[in-house]
């Protein structure tokens, strides 16, 4: 530290071939927007990142004084077999005047990298967790981020801030396969024009009720990934795209 849009067929069939994807049960809040990163929290910040969803972004404040950032990564498997993946990690100040880069390679075991620095003044830092790029098969894995030392964290995002955004249906219901936007006022709208509602059911478990037309769903939000089946977290119902 320095001072392809997928076809409907792919969306319906490919997730069946990658059901071994592990979604961590207690993930922290992440952001897919580099211009609006999520606040990193004290302790372990866990998540899952892959090339179909995109990079995860965090921010926190460091300095004055020494700080240590540790990122661990374990690649996901494919049909029960170990799969080599490389995770890129970038740390920069919010003006992007400097960037510290690391690459973590993993097959089946967890690997980690450590970044240590000593900033003279309080500085807002941006941490980017970047999955492998491209490919027709989902690649990535689970990661854990922690920051200790002279660091300061902002409060976590609210349930409304967590869910607001744009999603792509991965499980087609009521013939809706267009992009869907969740608004802060509890309204959701598909690009097709179909309107619906979302409502927080339980903040602690990130459970939401989603309704549109005849469809009524109880879904669990995995921040930075999307809304998943409450009984099978490996099944992404609405994948977060922005």
Image (spheres, helix red, strand yellow):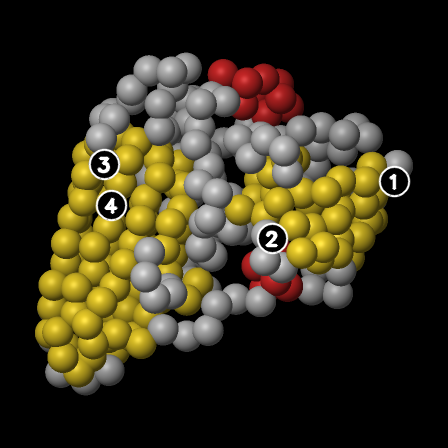
Q: Position of residue 98 (x, y in %)?
A: 18, 66
Name which of mark 4 and mark 3 comes first in the sequence: 4
In the figure, is residue 2 to the left or right of 59?
A: left
Residues at marks 3 and 1, CA–CA distance in whole angstroms: 44 Å
Q: Earlier in the sequence, mark 4 or mark 1?
A: 4
Q: Nearer the viewer, residue 171 or 77?
A: 77
The crowd level at tag 2 (other Cα within 10 Å; few <14, some 14-19, many 20+) is some
* Tag 1 secondary structure: loop
Separation of disc 1 and disc 2 at Cα? 23 Å
Which residue does the image show at 23% across and 26% down from the upper left?
A: 107
Viewport quadrant of the N terminus: bottom left
- Residue under label 1: 213
Circle 1 crowding by C-alpha within 10 Å: few under 14, some 14–19, many from 20: few
Circle 4 is placed at which residue position?
72
Q: Residue 37, image x and y in percent?
A: 42, 62
Q: Which residue is mark 2?
A: 206
Q: Do labels 4 and 3 touch, CB within 8 Å?
A: yes
- Circle 2 sits in a helix, a strand or a loop, which is it? loop
In the image, residue 74 above or below residue 146:
above
Q: Nearer the viewer, mark 4 or mark 1?
A: 4
Q: What number is the disc on residue 110?
A: 3
Tag nearer the camera, 1 or 2 = 2
Tag of residue 42:
none
Gap in angstroms between the C-alphas marked 4 and 1: 43 Å
In percent of width and height, residue 186 lies at: 76, 60
């Amino acid at each position: 530290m320095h001072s392809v849009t997928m076809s409907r067929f792919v969306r319906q069939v490919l997730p069946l071939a990658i059901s071994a994807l592990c979604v961590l049960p207690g993930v922290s809040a992440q952001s897919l927007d580099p211009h609006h990163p999520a606040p990193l929290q004290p302790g372990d910040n866990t998540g899952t990142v892959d090339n179909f969803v995109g990079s995860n972004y965090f921010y926190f404040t460091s300095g004055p004084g020494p700080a240590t950032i540790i990122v661990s990564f374990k690649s996901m498997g494919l049909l029960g077999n170990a799969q080599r993946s490389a995770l890129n990690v970038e740390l920069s100040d919010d003006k992007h005047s400097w960037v510290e880069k690391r690459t973590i390679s993993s097959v089946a075991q967890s690997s980690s990298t450590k970044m240590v620095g000593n900033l003279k003044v309080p500085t807002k830092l941006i941490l980017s967790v970047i999955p492998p790029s491209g490919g027709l098969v989902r690649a990535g894995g689970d990661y854990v981020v922690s920051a200790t030392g002279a660091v300061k964290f902002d409060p976590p995002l609210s349930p409304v801030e967590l869910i607001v955004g744009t999603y792509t249906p991965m499980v087609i219901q009521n013939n809706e396969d267009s992009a869907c936007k969740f608004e802060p006022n509890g309204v959701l709208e598909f690009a097709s024009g179909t309107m619906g509602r979302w409502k927080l059911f339980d903040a602690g478990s990130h459970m939401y009720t989603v309704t549109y037309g005849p469809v009524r769903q109880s879904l669990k939000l995995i921040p930075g990934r999307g809304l998943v089946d409450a009984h099978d977290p490996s099944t992404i119902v609405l994948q977060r795209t922005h």
